[in-house]
Amino acid sequence: MTVKLNERAFDRARDLIMAGRYVVDDRDAWSEHAPSRQQENDVIAQHSIGEYARWHLGFDDDEDEDNKGRYKFPYGDFEKVHRCALLAAESRAGQRKYYDIELAVA
């Protein structure tokens, strides 16, 4: 498994933050704020797997592009960037030695 930084998602997250579309929430709030599986499936059904991918800072290049499992490190709720999601992504990326993702989030 090779997880890499999703540059398009990173650029989009930065643009959303610059546009004020973010939530400054508590560090450990991501488990409460993360989209449900049903919400994820709805985004894919209503838009595309590409839209789903743009909300994930990493991707596993060993997985098929049409597979939800390819996309790692979500950063928001399909509307806004969440501080808690970024902190969780930074921590998990560092633990798993995905330094390009950890540095991008920092």
Image (cartoon, rainbow, N blue to C red):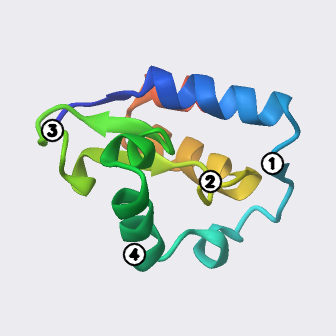
The residue type indicated by label 1 comes to Tyr
Q: Of the residues under marks 4 and 1, which one precedes in the sequence?
A: 1
Q: Quadrant of the N terminus?
A: top left
**Depth check, front residue: 36 or 27:** 36
Q: Is residue 56 above or below residue 10?
A: below
Callout 4 crowding tier (Cα within 10 Å): few <14, some 14–19, many ≥20? few
Label at residue 1: 3
The residue type indicated by label 3 comes to Met
Label at residue 37: 4
Report the residue marked by disc 1. 22
Q: Quadrant of the C terminus?
A: top right
The residue lying at 81 percent from left, 45 percent from top is 21
Label at residue 76: 2
The residue type indicated by label 4 comes to Arg
Left or right: 35, with 20 as reference point: left
Residue 106 visible in rendering: no
Residues at marks 3 and 2, CA–CA distance in whole angstroms: 24 Å
Q: Of the residues under marks 2 and 4, which one precedes in the sequence?
A: 4
Residues at marks 2 and 4, CA–CA distance in whole angstroms: 14 Å
The residue type indicated by label 2 comes to Gly
**Depth check, front residue: 7 or 99:** 7
Residues at marks 2 and 1, CA–CA distance in whole angstroms: 8 Å
